[in-house]
Amino acid sequence: MHLLGFGLLLLLWQEYPVFCGSSGWTFKHPQTIYAWEGACVWIPCTYKNQEEQMLLDNFTLYHNPEYDKDIKEFKGTVLYKKTDNSESFSYQNRVKKAEENCTLSINPVNIEDSGKLGMRVTWGGKKEKGDQEKADKWMEDLYLNVSKTPFPPELQLLPSEIKESELVTATCLLHFSCFEYDIQLHWSLEELDLASPTIENFTSLSTDNIFTKSMLKFKPLWTHHGKTLSCRVLHSSKVLSEKTVQLDVKHRPKLKIEVNPREAIVMKGDFVNMTCQVTSSNPEHRSISWLKNGIPMKEKQPTLTLPKVTKEKQGIYFCQASNAVGLGKSAEVNLQVLYAPEPSTVQIHPSPAKEGKSVELICVSLANPPAKNYTWHHNGDKILEETEEKFQISSVSLEHAGRYSCLAENIYGHGQSGQGAELDVQYPPKKVTVVIQNSTPIREGDNVKLFCEYHSSNPNVTRFYWSLGSSWNQIFTQVWFYKVSWDTPPITCKACNEWCSESSSVNLDVQYAPRDVKVLQTTPSSEIRAGNRVVLQCDFSQSRPKEVQFFWKKNGSLLQEGRELVFNSISPEDAGNYSCSINNSIGETMSEIRRLQVLYAPRRLRVSFTPGDRVMEGRKAALTCESDANPPVVHYTWFDWNNQDLQYNGRTLRLEPLQIEHSGSYRCQVSNRLGTGESPPSTLTVYYSPESLGRRAAIGIGSCLGIVILAIWGMKFQQQKRARSRQGAQENSSSQSFFVQNKKVRRAPLSEGPHSLGCYNPVIEDSISYAALRFPEMDAPRTGDAGTSEMQGPLANNNDTVTYSVVQKRHVGDYENVVPDLSEDEGIHYSELVQFGVGERSRVHEDVDYVTLKQ
């Protein structure tokens, strides 16, 4: 069972070769094995063939083997032997070998087993043709050291120099281990227990090392110095061997004080003796020194003697000494000196004290034991109710100010009342007020002198603060000159020493002109349209005095008086810049200008022509629709003389190039979101160019001459028959008549048609007279020019012929066919040649002279 179990462990040892054999074989095992009689021996051993793994054919273990050259073989005591085809042999049945390697065990082991052991191994070789099979052989040596009794372990301390409270590692090592022989390593320290030790145990059975080890880690105390540390080897709780070492613990000096008297409590004037003893020091200590309350004393001797103690000798005493490791200190001794209370003093907290705050008075009187009973005095008078060390006033006032003293008492007697203490009660300035040193009333912009007064103060006032509303200004003077504004808030002052006292606020009651004057539109609340009722109100935020007057202005001119401005039916002409002003006895305030806009539908429409209303054909003209509207016009529509929509929506209608057919009246229609407006018709006249006139004049010049001759003959006839013609025209005429009509309006050029010839040209009208001859249409009457429109009507029959003759002379009249009299030089005369026939006579005009020529 043991050989099988440890055979598995030995597979891990193959990486530590210690010997190389022939034919590529490697053996690993410890070189020397240690044991004692009665124990056992475990020899770990492995082998390996680098080419191929093979089992040993023959294995023999010799004790002290010797080689015989004659027989070429080893001789000695055979402890174990095993061949390939025979049973194994064990000497005294104590030796065993593992099957899978060369590990051996001897149990029990005897002292006679000490010496050299030889492992003789052979293994078969490869058989070649015609030859005998060859075998390899090898002898492996190792040494067995068996003692009569168990040998002690090795004990080592690290670090070599041990110091108090520093970590130390102690290692106990025994070069022995065997699976069939259990051992333990046990630690012990003489007379003392180890402080928080840590122990780690290790066992090794490898081809490199065989050992049992224990490691102890601890921090030694100074009391461990000189003590023995032991490591014992136990087998079945029996101590087989041990190793000891004496600890040399380096530490600071260890001191203690012997006091006489032992309690260290003495009366004032008694004798005291203190001795400083060094209980331990490694290495040896140096000189001893004394300290009182942490302060070094002059004494350097181990014994400190105080022949007559006073209260000043009372305190904490200790001694100290040093060596190479450090400084050592003794325990403290509290020396108490008993005595009656000494003259007392009074402490006041806080001092000086603020009025209304808490104050604590303490009676200080040194005494041992402390005083238990106290007597207090204020300005020499005993305060009966106070008998404690501390006297507290919860809310100090001026009545508590003065000198305080106290008297202390303990079991050893009464003390004396020493110098007392003065309680100084301080307080902020009292009865602070603001005084206005100005005549009233105060107007906006006046300089006001203000004075901050107070009744009393402790300590004295050092600074002043002035406040306007909530903000404070640090002005150290008691008098303040201030230029007031209309909205000056209440004024407050503070008088300050260490604390500040604030006065009541003072209102200056400043008089000022009306503030925040503005124009409000109360009706309507939204936009203003023509015809609405509109109410403007003059508003303001405040005024002092409150009695005010209101005035209105439009575009800078005074309009009326009163708070409200009312328009019962507003018109566009009411639009403008309005403002109001409000005044009181202090002054006048003007509002900002308010622009009053009135919305209305388009109005005052007309069509304007550029460059004019008479333009020659071939050029260009611009027709602009002018209007007055608020909001502005958003849509335009143009119409011609036939009421035909020109399908143009712009403000300006452009005609380019102009033609005679463009002559006529035009109008525009516009709209905004409030309504629609339409302009009256405006006439555009397009006249012929000189080139067109030349062509037409050549055709009609002959006819014009004939008409002129006819016109001259008619005038002569008219002069002779004027009286009779008037009567005959009223009674007998049944056909169309020849008449003359006054007309002062300038005639537009004749429309171009297939039956008319024109000699009119406005370009040269100032210097040219012209005649027009018209031939009426045969089928239906045709509209003529402005001068002949009254002659329109149905003809008697289609055979009648009417001939017109018009002669114009600019310096006499608009038209000319006869020479007028001086009284009729402003008239226009027409002559008409008529072929008598059946038909209705034209209407008789009272202001026209008629001449009738009959065939």
Image: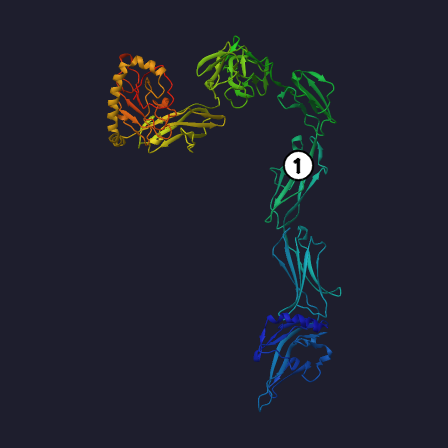
Helix, strand or loop under label 1: strand
Residue 42 is situated, as x and y percent measured from the top left of the image, at: 68, 72
Q: Quadrant of residue 842?
A: top left
In the picture, residue 811 is in which quadrant?
top left
Amino acid beneath label 1:
Ile
In the rendered image, residue 340, in percent from the top left (x then y), is placed at 71, 26
Q: Nearer the viewer, residue 598 or 693?
A: 693
Q: Which residue in the protein does label 1 denote?
A: 316
- Residue 452, x across and y down, in percent: 55, 14
Is residue 456 something one can see in this rendering? yes
Q: Above or below — where is 314 with respect to 544? A: below
Disc 1 residue crowd, few under 14, some 14–19, many 20+, Cα 10 Å: some
Can you say which quadrant of the picture contains the N terminus? bottom right
- Tell me if residue 343 can be seen: no
In the rendered image, the residue lying farthest to the top is 439
Q: Quadrant of residue 607?
A: top left
Left-right relation of 821 to 158: left
- At x 55%, y 22%, the residue is 525
Colour scheme of this structure image? Answer: rainbow
Quadrant that contains the C terminus: top left
Q: Which of 377 and 473 lies nearest the eye of the viewer?
A: 473
The residue lying at 54 percent from left, 15 percent from top is 542
Which of 278/58 is in front?
Answer: 58
